[in-house]
Amino acid sequence: MSYQVLARKWRPKTFQELVGQEHVVRALSNALQQQRLHHAYLFTGTRGVGKTTLARILAKALNCENGITAEPCGVCSACTEIDKGRFVDLLEVDAASNTKVDQMRDLLENAQYAPTVARFKVFIIDEVHMLSTSSFNAMLKTLEEPPAHVKFILATTDPQKMPVTVLSRCLQFNLRQMPVTSITEHLHAVLQKESISAESVALQLIARAASGSMRDALSLLDQAIAYGSGAVHEAEVRAMLGAIDQSYLFTLLQALARRDGAGLLAVARSMEERSLSFDAALGELALLLHQIALAQSVPDAIPADLPERPQLLELAALFKPEDIQLYYQIALLGRRDLGLAPDEYAGFSMCLLRMLAFAPNDAQIYKQASTPAPSQGTNPPPVVQAQIAAPPLAEMERTPATYSPQQETLPEKPLAVQQATAEIKPSESIATTFDGNWRGLVDTLKLSGMARMLAQNCALVAFDGQQMRLSVPPEHKHLLDNTYQEKLRTTLKEHFGKQLHVAIEVSGNAINTPARQINQEKAARQAQAEASIQGDPFVRDLMESFGATIIPSTIKPAQ
């Protein structure tokens, strides 16, 4: 028996088997159950989303020998003949190769005759937008006054090219592109039926490459099975698709977080040596940055079973959300302009250097203010765009790295810092080896990534030497992943050198966290920096003499 490709072998034969088009299936099923039948249906959508498949299922639903139903039996002669593509009262026409008006007139003349064996004579016209204007005009009369025994099912990828007079006489359904998760799940189900082993990441790569088309996904799956000698492995699928190994991208972002220009270029050279596609690399990098942005804003949107989830969450902790947005934009623009670069390596490496150049560096503050020429006529006043450093805080105004009870009475500290420091005392007695300074303790713990974020967003409730109670504010409850909690518990036990019971709970009273203390201190320093800039004689002279304006976003306190 000859081999049948997966796209044909596993083509849905009922509404229930159709993947990703629930909104269309529901509407058609209700109409069939209520016998509310239209004479012309139009299915629109991109390639491979199920337009023709849906048309054939609808033809079976209309002509099943058990009656008009949303669940055709699949075993009667009408159902089986339609599945085999040889039902006498079902005519499928490819409009791309039958555009002449004479051919359309012959088809419409055939429509006047009653069906031979079926309940309805069904005409499926694929890529209907390819018909000529004369063909559409010939069809219009039949669509206006259709015989009772005729049903038209039209399918197109480009409904904008169809005359509005035809569109208005059809019941239109727009089939959506299928999400990656739906395609991946369907590929898993197909491979289970085929008894073929596969790696989850490999199927996700195929689903992503299919761009919403189930037919393309199944065709790529066929290719992957052949490429992998009967199995589907991630490395082989990446090679087949020309996809970029994620490890390169993770290494790039880690180097970017360290401001390591040499490390960035080393990865780019390694990719060039392996002849990897830099266009694909920028596309994958943009996708990875999108996932990191999701991890920062909506961590629950990252599937728990995603293999890269721990790395995504770790990278999310290394960057500010606004930085990720900037890098995403640079990656998109870099991919767009890649063809204009001297060569792909130059274009790719320039993107990386651009990310490095625009990366924030709070330690480097500039004091630049060129004297502009006086404004003349109606020209707008000049704007001071240079970052102007505020004078450093006095030694007594600096926040110490750790707190102790003796430091809480210093009057020179900003009020917000005094309040944050005073509230650090736990409500119960604590061991003599720990003075209750939770923030100071967190600074000394050997934690990184999301486990450190969890510690910084905890407040100490109680500690008696054997048991420690911590609370997390509700807005940070997503940090209570078992992995991060266990890392924090293990690190605390190692720090104290003994068994320690650590309980972490969610509480609205968790206001005294190190993260909030740091934010309060930053806000206090920022307020002082802005006041210092406003009072700086040089700045005031610029504003009074030349009408200059301070850009608030460029004011940064000195470190």
Image (tube, helix red, strand yellow):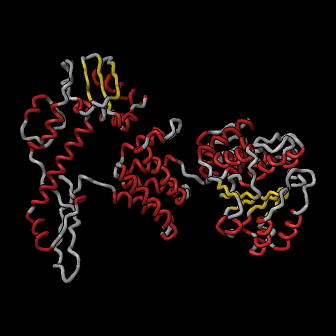
Task: Indicate the position of residue 15 as horizontal and vertical percent values.
Answer: 73, 44
Relative to 456, is 435 above or below? above
Q: Where is residue 534 in the image (x, y as percent from the top left)?
A: 13, 60
* Residue situated in front as seen by the camera: 285 or 268: 285
Q: Is residue 425 left or right of residue 396?
A: right
Q: Is residue 202 visible?
A: no
Q: Among all residues in the image, which is located at the extreme left? A: 411
Q: Which residue is drawn at 9% across and 47% down?
A: 394
User: Can you give x and y, in whole percent of width and height, for residue 330 in the image?
Assistant: 42, 60
Of the 4 image quadrants, the one containing the N terminus is: top right
Residue 277 found in image quarter: bottom right
The total of numbered circles placed on residues is 0
Foreground pick, 384 / 370: 384
User: In this picture, is 394 found above or below 456?
Assistant: below
User: At 77% across and 57% down in the image, what residue appears?
Assistant: 39
| Residue farthest right in this picture | 116
Can residue 515 be seen in the rendering of this structure? Answer: yes
Q: In this view, does 479 lie above or below 524?
A: above
Q: Where is residue 225 in the image (x, y as percent from the top left)?
A: 71, 45
Is residue 47 toward the left or the right of residue 504 in the image? right
Residue 466 or residue 377, whichever sits in front: 377
Which residue is rendered at x = 9% and y = 59% of the image?
A: 535
**Looking at the image, is 557 positioned above or below residue 398?**
below
